């Protein structure tokens, strides 16, 4: 029987379409070509030796005299840092100069690695760079939203193959972010505590959607997953901002993130994916009602007219089966 | 200079990323294979002769003893009509049985036609069927949202090639629909009139984004277009529900819809697209604050992590240039 399920925070609904249900293993990708990617490409602007093709590093980590990670301004930034945040009218329409900051985290010198296949040290450096840059950007007065994300593969919208993440900092908090924040505020006003913490308690009680639980993190396929194998990583200790986590938590986050992506890579044969770290806006960085988390969205299906029109996603796979499948993947 | 632009109704923002700007003609599709699609396929469940492969017609239009359009229940419906709408708790989570109705409009007996290449009579029949089924579904007590949409091509999420549209009727109005409705309510409370009517006045004054204006409709690329060539068709006479339009308006809608899709097909070499008719929820079908419209979203780019995380779409093309390009396409 199909069912509607509601996202506890955003209040958006999904349809779990059991009549069209697919087994998790039906999402296995065909990606033979990946295996032939070389560790270095002359024409890749992110490969060592081509540093002049990118702007100068804002942050880097070195080992034995060579960089192992670089953060650089995005050369093709959608936003620019020298503009104002002033709102203007064009007739009845509202607009603003495209002020903002866009950076690229080049995660490794090796062109053909992925988070799933990297040295664990490289993943640790990557999340350390996330925190470092997040803190630096949040000190810029006009910035109010900092989004860290990673697009992996063509279906996930990336054009550059070399392993990298991105950060975009904007002066604007859009309704897409503000609406769920308002819902979690209302919930906190009503119940006195964080709705995400309550959700985690419930997931821990039900267990069916939990992929892994470590000392500081819980990995799960959400009750109202919008697409097959949507997977979220929640910190167990309440922090509204990603930057509030301790170094010990951060290092565990690196290994949990890598393990989760390994499960997806091994279990589904290296699917394309986006992941996003959803942290509170800078002004709300220490609040009871928000809880940061990472969401991984493998690109296994195509949202169509119904999803665009209603925001109700039709998901043909049970999150419980996805979690069970991921738990069973051998990653060591 | 890049700029933020706000959708006047939803209050969501887009970034018009002029630094990465592409000219409209850079979105020309490579689609040679389309030309070889036959007018009839033995193995297509929607082709004449295979009527037994679909459920019986709910509505049909015939000519010379053969059907030219059929509406059938969706055999692989994501929702089912025999369930209840009762909400249930699963621990702290909220869910409901998957009650709802899903229908398919088989627009023509010809397998290889598209809205752009159909006989105008077929497009008229299609929009007549939309209205007919919308009215029938809105009389079912538990239904509150009726979404008419069309997925064209693989990138738009369709698996069946035969020309068809879909209708999904749900008992639930999700926040994705309710939030903009609330905004248009607030605007109507503040200014006393329909924000969409005001937006059309402004577009008519500025002219830059208008593709075509007819007696009853205005076609435009919205100020805050989320992706290249997003195009909307607004009725000039205020109606909150699609079903309130007169037969005369409906017939003009068919020809405006076809002309707009012809412009996209000829101008961009037959891109995949989704279109959606956004009509008010059934309970709000005669209100001052909502205004129905059709939105066409050609699938020319891939939303990535930033879009998923923030709802802020980065659009590398000026809506003004897209409108100019579409105006210049010869379609007769």
Image (tube, coloured by chain):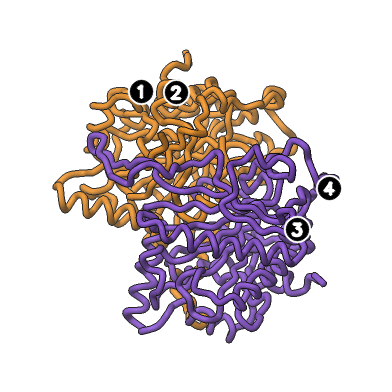
Chain colours: A purple, B orange
Question: Of tags 4 and 2, which is closer to the observer?
Answer: 4
Instruction: Look at 17% across and 44% down and name the residue there.
Output: B193
Q: Are marks 2 and 3 on the same chain?
A: no
* Secondary structure category for the residue under label 2: helix
Q: In this orientation, which residue lies closer to the viewer: B102 or A46? A: A46
Report the quarter where the N terminus of chain A lies.
bottom right
Task: Verify CB contact (< 8 Å) between mark 4 and mark 3.
Answer: no
Question: Of tags 4 and 3, which is closer to the observer?
Answer: 4
* Picture quadrant of residue B259: top left
Q: x%, y% of residue B43?
A: 74, 38
**Residue bearing the label numbered 3:** A26
Q: Are marks 4 and 3 on the same chain?
A: yes
For marks 2 and 3, give the CA distance. 40 Å
**Residue bearing the label numbered 1:** B212
* Secondary structure category for the residue under label 3: helix
Q: In this orientation, which residue lies closer to the viewer: B294 or B176? A: B176
Q: Callout 3 environment at 10 Å: few (<14), some (14 to 19), or many (20+)?
A: few
Marking on residue A32? 4
For marks 4 and 3, give the CA distance. 17 Å
Q: Callout 2 environment at 10 Å: few (<14), some (14 to 19), or many (20+)?
A: some
Q: x%, y% of residue B125?
A: 46, 31
For mark 4, name the chain.
Answer: A
For marks 4 and 1, give the CA distance. 47 Å
- Above-or-below relation of A175 to B195: below
Instruction: Look at 58% across and 30% down and name the residue there.
Output: B271
**Residue bearing the label numbered 2:** B259
Task: Verify CB contact (< 8 Å) between mark 4 and mark 2.
Answer: no
Instruction: Look at 33% across and 81% down and name the residue there.
Output: A190
């Amino acid at each position: 029987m199909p069912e509607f399920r509601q996202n506890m925070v955003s209040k958006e609904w999904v349809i779990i379409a059991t009549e069209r249900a697919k087994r998790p293993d039906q999402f296995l990708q065909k990606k033979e070509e990946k295996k032939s990617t070389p560790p270095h490409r002359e024409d890749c602007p992110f490969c060592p030796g081509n540093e002049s093709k990118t702007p100068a590093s804002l942050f880097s980590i070195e080992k034995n005299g060579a960089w192992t990670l670089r953060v650089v301004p995005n050369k093709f930034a959608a936003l620019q840092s020298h503009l104002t945040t002033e709102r203007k009218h064009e007739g009845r329409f509202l607009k603003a100069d495209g002020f903002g900051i866009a950076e690229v985290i080049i995660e490794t010198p090796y062109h053909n690695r992925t988070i799933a296949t990297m040295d664990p040290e490289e993943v640790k450096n990557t999340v350390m760079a996330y925190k470092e840059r997040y803190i630096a950007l949040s000190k810029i007065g006009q910035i109010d939203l900092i989004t860290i994300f990673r697009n992996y593969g063509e279906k996930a919208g990336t054009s550059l193959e070399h392993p990298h993440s991105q950060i975009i900092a904007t002066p604007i908090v859009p309704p897409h972010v503000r609406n769920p924040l308002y819902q979690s505020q209302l919930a906190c006003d009503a119940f006195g505590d964080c709705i995400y913490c309550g959700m985690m308690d419930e997931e821990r009680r039900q267990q069916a959607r939990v992929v892994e639980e470590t000392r500081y993190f819980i990995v799960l396929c959400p009750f109202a997953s919008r697409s097959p194998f949507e997977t979220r990583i929640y910190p167990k200790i309440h922090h509204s901002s990603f930057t509030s986590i301790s170094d010990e938590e951060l290092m565990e986050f690196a290994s949990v993130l890598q393990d989760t992506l390994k499960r997806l890579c091994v279990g589904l044969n290296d699917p394309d994916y986006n992941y996003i770290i959803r942290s509170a806006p800078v002004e709300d960085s220490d609040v009871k009602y928000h809880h940061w988390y990472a969401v991984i969205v493998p690109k296994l299906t195509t949202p169509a007219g119904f999803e665009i029109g209603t925001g109700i996603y039709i998901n043909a796979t049970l999150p419980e089966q996805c979690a069970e499948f991921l738990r069973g993947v051998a990653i060591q």
